[in-house]
Each structure stands twice: as structure tokens, then as C-alpha cells.
Amino acid sequence: MVKMKPSRTKNTVKSATVIGGSPSQPKTSAEIINEARSSLRILKTQRPFTPKDDQRKLFGSTSSRAPENRPPSAFSLHARSFEGSDSRPISGARLTPLDHKPKIPTSPSKDEGHPIPKPPLDPIEIKRVSNARARLFKVASQGNLIPDKVIHPEETLESPGIVKTPPQVQAIKRLNSDSSLNLKAFSHDADAAALSQLNANILANESTECGREEMIVPTRVREHVGSLSTQTSLGSEQTKQDSRPSTCPGNTEIIKEQNRTGSSSGSRTSEGETEKEILYWDTKIQPILDELRLLNNGNDAEHLCKKCSSLHRTLLEGNMLGKMCKRRAVLLKTLYKLVDVGSDQLSIQLAKLILALKVSGKNLLNICKLMFKISRSENNDVLFQNDNILDCLVEVLSFADPLGNIDAFLYCMGTIKFLSGNMILLKDLLNKGLVETLVQLMKEINDANRASDTYLCSSGHLLVQVTATLRNLADLPQSRSRFLSTGALFELCVVLEQHVNDKDICTNVARIFSKLSAYNDCCLALSECTSCYQLFLALLNRHQRKQDLVVRVVFILGNMTAKNNKAREELYKQKHSVETLLTLFQTYHELDVKVKINPLKTQNKSEMDENKNQRFSEVEDILIKLIRVIANLSINTEVGSALSGNQNCVDLLIKVLEYKTVDKCEELMMNAAASINNLSYYQVKNSAVRARQLHITDLLMKLLLCNNMDAILEAARVFGNLSRCKEVRDFIVQKNVDKFMITLLDAKHQDVCFAACGVLINLTVDKNKRPILKQDGGIKKLIDCLRDFGPTDWQLASLVCKTLWNYSEKITNAVLCFGEQETSELLELLPAYLDEEIALDIDTNGFDVDLVEHHKVCWESEFVPVAQQLLHRIQCHHSHLEALPFCPLQD
């Protein structure tokens, strides 16, 4: 007697052959056959839908970040915003004199270097040499250098009623009080050198008070220095020393640039420039800058763009990009002024040129903000398709320090994220190595966060942009090899681990994995990241009510457990894994019932219906994908046996069947039936399925009687497993399910016929149920299945022969048992199918080699043994003449 071997589908065979297990350890033919014969079903489902944001923002409308706790997506940006010590030229304007009188130190400190020289001892000599300079000082000064009360040179500090003044300052006052000071004589006098040193030390002493825009020095001393520095025609080296500016921290590079270039117009040469560089600047670059200044007044954006492009080419030809140009500050100052023109096309040209000059600090941030503003409009995407601006964006992420420029990186990544929504630009970004760049960026951030949590919050904002961009890149099939070769999946797992409380990052990473896990190679690579299982369970525990995250995590787990038995084992052995899944199941089942019974109250009915349907659909989608994980997990013998005895798990599946209908929740009902089918496969003593099998059978009737063939197929598979029990077989006959199964043999669909035949073979175990086959034309339909599907499906052919074998157990005459026509067909078909040349003579073009081999093994191991026995039985009990009743001989 043969009982029903559990059913299977073609998808199971193919998936087991192609993707089951590790590629380095292919399955044997026996393993393939065993999986193909089992009733354990691998479930598939659609990937969760990701809606597109209507507006381009750093953080979308669904972001969990409060507006006050995240960087802004809208801001104002002008030419005056571009400040900073790395490139801003010094102002040529003179400062307003200070109202207070700064204190001049009476004695130098040890750290100040040379001591302040003593003033000249002979005031008469000072008077003599300074007569010629009185007029010069008067012309050059911008205010009175002499206080209201002038101390005469002959007056001493000990004089009564006189405020004590340091001797160094006395020297300056005595010099300025003489109207006949001679400049030439003074420049060669020893006292002049002393005065010069005095001025330098005073400036150095006061440099700590310098401001952001320009150094601040005592009023009189500063104006005195100014008077010397403006008289360039004198050509005095001493004058240059006297006009030395301050070197306060914020102005170091500005002062250096001023010393090199002089005025902001660039007319003066820079220190260290060669004659060739000076000539190139004057003949090639300076004319373009002059034109830019003229065009800027008229705000002719089109011509400005052309000139900026020309300037870029000229600088490139002269090897003056980066920080090679010695008059870089002059260039940048001119370019910054053009930002106020307000043209997006011009701003792109400016950004490209300024980035090529390798700005840093605040200026890098402002340029990234400028491009971010432009990229917020989809209409501007075409501007980024020209002039290699994408190269500049990717290069920013490569050459700059991410943690030192984290705000600039944030807006640069925001720009790239917006542009990656454009398929043309997305492919271009992929070809420019964006995946590799972003993976390296993630690695640097992850390493820094391992060492310290200083940048954890700010790096979180940046990682939202990085992961959102990788999510878009994952859409491209050609990106998958890059994700695998760069170790992106591992780094994304580290990001998840470090930011497990950040819902935005977790959702983006889940979206990436949900896309990639749909492909076999990526799914296998993710399964080998052993830390991911605990991470996914942690996400489900921490963010139970964040539906868009939960639905993707369970979808990923469903993909992993569908394609790899090792993944099933790894997930199951994680602490509280089954409890987490069932708790989630219970939570969303209750929410599903609540939404269905008590929808959210809104002001108008249409809005109420729309909100209800949306919430209902989201919750249902989570249940669909969660049940799929349970079904796929139960394919593993250990896990399946444990789950079949889990009362809570079986009860939840039954509840789905109880309150759902196929016409409204088709996929959910089918997944629940498939999960019960997998669990019913295991005949364990404490099976919760067996304990409630009659109730389950009754619930499956509504699937069996619906108009959906897929739902009917799922129900038939469950009937095939449950019908191993006599109580269920009696129920089937009582409800006329047997007649329905015979009707399904006409479906002309291999899987449907296989499932129906599985139920019928179990019914033939009971002798009193065997006549059903002949009364309802079952024998004829079984032979039709053998003829139609035998050469392409030897498993189905084997199942048909087993059913006929059970049916003919007490055969005495083949014709009486099967019928004359049916017997003739069997005697014709079986010998032909047992001939190897005829049986395996099929077109193998387009078939996988493994599938062809599997087809042959199925014929040899499953069909041939039972077909030979059935043929032999028919031949032994076949006669063209009807047998006469036996009569004893009489004497």
C-alpha cells in the first residue's frame, strides 16, 4: 500500500536546483529529488513599495528627526557668505581709529624676541634729521598723531603734573612733532632703525587684539605704519618692515596673500612668482578677470558662464588649479562676487571652478550649499549633465576629511542624493565610482565611531544621505557586483549596529537590503554576515510600530530563509528569535483587527476610507511577509518540527484563515495556507496542526470553493498532507471534496493535478473509498494526466501509477478493474515510457544541465520501479476474453 508522498511544485524543484545551498557545494541528485518530493513550500512575495518624496529635502517627510534637531534644507546664500582665512583677500579700507588708548608694554617678555631699543638720547639730533619729514607725515596721516597735550622733548617724566609715558612712545611723539624731518636722512640714521624695530614690536604686541576682517593696532602707530607703506615710490626696505601686518590666528593666510599680491586687484606681483608666471597672469588671466568684473555689473549670466569656462581652461593650461596659483585669493574674491548674480547655470560654473581651486573650511561648505540649492529643483538636473560637475562632487568626498568637513559633506551628499533620483545621472554616478567612494566614506565614519562617539550624531545626519544614495544605486543591476566587491553589505551592517536607534538610517539600510536580497548572489553574501540576524531582530524589537521599517526587515528575512538552509538555522538559533517573530505577528494581527473594526475618525468619509485602506494595506503587507518568514523557516526539519508543535504559532495562522477572505486578502490567505501546509508535513507527537486538523480542514473549504485557482491549489496541497489521517479522509468524503479533486485532474495544470492526485492516493488507502475513482471517471482522468504530463514530469507520472497501484490491490481482472479502453491505454503507455530512448527523448535546448540530469534521475528512481510493477500486474490479469465464473466438475 502506498500513501501519498507529500506534494511539491515546479518552483520548488527549480529553486532548489539553481540557488539552494552554497555554490561551492552543489546539491546531489538525491537531495534535489527529496526536496522536489516534499510538500514544503518556499514562498515568494513582492518587494515593499517605496514612495517617492514630492519635494527634495535633506530629510524626507517621513523622517523621524524633529526639524529643530536637523540641518536645514532651506537657507540664504550670498557673496558675503564666502569668508574664511583660506582664501579671503585683505580689505583695502582703513579702519576707524580706536577711542581708547591701548597700553604699550613697558618691558618685553622673554617670548617676544629682541628687546625694544632705547630711544635716542640726543633730542637735538632727532630734531635735525626729522625736519624734512614733517610735511610727509602731515600728508600721509589720516588724523592727528599728537595728543592734546604735547610733551616737549626737553620735558622729563619726573616733571610735576605730567603723565608718565614710556620712553619708546616719547620717541615717536618727538619725531612727529618736528615739521622739518628729512626722510632720506632718517632712513639711514641709526635712530631710524631703532624706531622701525619699535613699530614692529608694538604691532606684534597688539596682534592678539586683531579682528576677523583686518588687524587692529593702536591708532597712532597704525596710521604711522600706513603712511610708510603707502609711499611705494620711496622703495625703502625699512618701510616694508615697518608696514608688516599682524599675524593673528584668523588672518595668517590673508596677510601672506597680501604680502604676495599687494592690492586685491592683482596688479602687483606675488612673492615667489617667476617671470613666466607673471607674464601668464598678465596676458592670459588678468584680462578674463577684468571682463568678469565688467560683465558682473551688467549681470549678463550667459557671457559670465562663457568667461568662467574660459578661465577654467586657462588656469588648467597654466597649471594653476588647486593651490598652485600664487594669486589664488584674487581669483576667489572675483568668483565669490558672481554668486549674487543668482543664475543657476552660472552657479554651476562657479562651483566647478571654485572646487577646482581646492577651497576648504567655510568656503567649501558654502559651495556645497550652493550646489545643494540648485539640485533641489528637478528642472536643474540637466545642468549637472554637463561640464563634469559630477566629477567635482565625487572628488569632494574623496580628497577632504569627512569628520573635519562634516557639514560640507552633508550638503554635498544631499546634492548627490537628489541627482541619483535621475536615472541618467544615476548611471553616470555609478560609472564614476560612487559606490566605492561611499563605501570608503562609511568605513571611515564607522572606524571613527568605534573609537569615540563624538561624531555619532553629526555623522548620523550624513549617513542618512549616504544610505539614501546607496538605496538609489541598488536599483541598477550593474551595481550589484560593486556592492559585493567593496564589502558594502558588511559596512552597512556596522552602520546599523552603531545607529540602531536612528529610524531614518535603519529604514534606508533596510531598503538597500530589501532590493539586494532579491538577487541570489547578494542574498547569499548577506546571509554570511552572521551579525545581521541579531541586528534584524533588534530592529524588530526596538521599532515594532514603525511599519515601513518592519515590513522591509521581514521581507529581507523572508528572502534569506527562502534561499539558504544555513540562514534558516542561523536565524532560528538567535536568542528569542521565534518569540520576536510571534510577538510581532500577534501585535500586527491585533492592529489589523482594530483597523478593520474601528477605522480612524476623520472629518469626511472619503478621507476616512482612504486612510482606512492605506493603514489596512500596510498592516496586511507586514502579516503577509511575516507569515512568509515562518513558512520558509519551517522548511528546515529542526525548525519546522518545533514550529509545528508551537500552539501560539498555529493559533495565529488559524485566526488569519478565520477572519480573512480570499477575494479581499488573497496573498495573505494563501501564505497562511502554505505555512500550515509546511507545518502539517511534520508528524510529531505534539503537533498543534494535528490537534486542530479538522478545524483547519473546514476553514480550507472556503479556499477550495473560491474562483481563484492559486488559492484552490494551496488548499489542495494542505488536504494532501492532512488526508494522511483517517478522520480527515472521512471529512473529505463527507464534504464531497473527493469529487472536487477528481474534477481538478482536468485542470491541465501539472501542479494542480499533482496536488489533486496526492489527495486521491491517500483516499485509496481506505478500501471502501476506492470505488470513488471509477464512479466519477477518475481512472480515465488519471490516465490522461499520465499521457499528457508523463514525458515532462516523471514525478507526476509516478504519483499516477501509485494511485492506480493502490486502487488495483485486489485486482482479478484488469478490464473489470480499470475498464477496457483504460487498460489498453495503460498497456500502450507504460511500455513506451519504460523505454529509455523514448522516455528521455525530449528537447533539452534551453534547459539547465542540472535540470536535465534531475529529469533523468526522477525517471530512473521514481517512475520506473512503480511503472514496472503496475505493468506486470496488468499483464498478469489481462485477458481479451472475459473470465467465466468457476464451476466444479460433476460426475
Image (cartoon, rainbow, N blue to C red):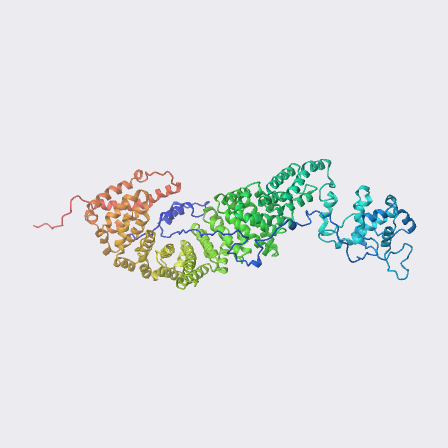
Q: Is residue 377 visible?
A: yes
x, y (%) of residue 774? 22, 51
Q: Residue furthest left?
A: 891
Numbered circles on residues, count: 0
The answer to whether residue 235 is seen in the rendering is no
Q: Is residue 836 left or right of residue 61?
A: left
Q: Position of residue 46 (x, y in %)?
A: 42, 51
Pick whichever, 663 or 365, lies toward us. Answer: 365
Q: Position of residue 468 (x, y in %)?
A: 52, 51
The residue at the point 50 percent across, 43 percent down is 424
Q: Nearer the viewer, residue 708 or 528?
A: 708
**Residue at figure coordinates x 86%, y 59% from the top left:** 164
In the rendered structure, the answer to whether residue 240 lies left or right of residue 56 reads right
Image-based side of 341 in relation to 841, left or right: right
Q: Position of residue 472 (x, y in %)?
A: 50, 48
Instruction: Classify residue 8 as left or right of residue 485.
Output: left
* Residue nearest the observer in this picture, 172 or 59: 172
